[in-house]
Image: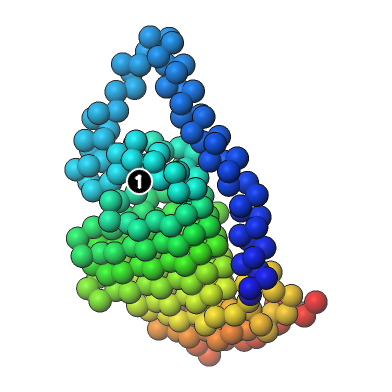
Amino acid sequence: MILDVMYSTHRFSQHAADFFRLGKIIFSQCLNILERRGRIQMLNIEPINKARIAAGFLTVEETVALMDNGNLIPDPFSTLVSRNVLLGENNLIYPGVTLQASGEGKVVIGNGNVFHSGTMIDASHGRIEIGSDNQFGEGGFTAKANQPGADIHIGSVCRFLNNPSVFGKTRLEDGSQLLGNITVVSCLLKAGGSHRTPDPELRAGLLKGFGTAQNLTVNQGHVIAGNGSFSQENSVPQSTYHPKR
């Protein structure tokens, strides 16, 4: 697992500086082009910022400033980040991502995560804590702490693809995977190696398929596949689907 983290971090850091510079250059050049063409009035962002502030989000300029910590935000206009979100460093946030903490909600995010378009992290009543070097999407991802007592913990080096949604008191420990359009409510996926770990018996817990998974525990090296619903009795070793290499 340590090697997975080192590999991911090294790979990310190789491109972070270039993406950071590119993002700021593109933003600056867009403004310069509009100004040269005499169309700067068309980009009056004051109403946009007023709407963002009213909804508890950072202004466009404040969103751009998040890149000072090495975060990469190619399109700050379509990225919404609440003032109460604690965002780490070197996260890549694609267009169409919402990171929101309102009311009694808290969102804490580590470093080196990738948030693909269609990701929504939303805490209005509980806490959402995210580690480092995770992949959210492609295909969308939702985590909502929108009920009293909600508590969502996401470890590090996890992978979530094709629009899973997470609610309730859920723990997705290091290396966990959600693959598919799955509604996850108050489940525990136990820690292990990431999807890159050669031995499937050493990988973290995995849910795949589609449907609703509620109050389930997936142990290291195991997977539960669902076809509309998920059952604890269907937990099997991941080597059932992925023989040892």
- The answer to whether residue 48 of the structure is visible from this angle is yes
Q: What's the residue at 63%, 73% (across, down)?
A: 2
Looking at the image, residue 24 lies above or below residue 178: above
Badge count: 1
Quarter holding the C terminus is bottom right
Looking at the image, residue 147 lies above or below residue 189: above
Q: Residue furthest bottom?
A: 233
Expressed as whole percent of the image width and height from the top left, the position of residue 32 reads: 45, 18
Q: What's the residue at 21%, 35% (across, down)?
A: 50
Q: What's the residue at 53%, 57% (across, down)?
A: 112
- The answer to whether residue 179 of the structure is visible from this angle is no
> What is the crowding at mark 1: few (fewer than 14 residues within 10 Å), some, or many (at least 20)?
many
Q: What's the residue at 49%, 48% (across, down)?
A: 70
Kindly identify the amino acid type of the residue bearing the numbered disc 1. Leu
Expressed as whole percent of the image width and height from the top left, the position of residue 40 reads: 35, 16
Q: Which residue is mark 1?
A: 80
What is the image's colouring?
Answer: rainbow
Quarter holding the N terminus is bottom right
Left or right of 148 on screen, residue 231: right
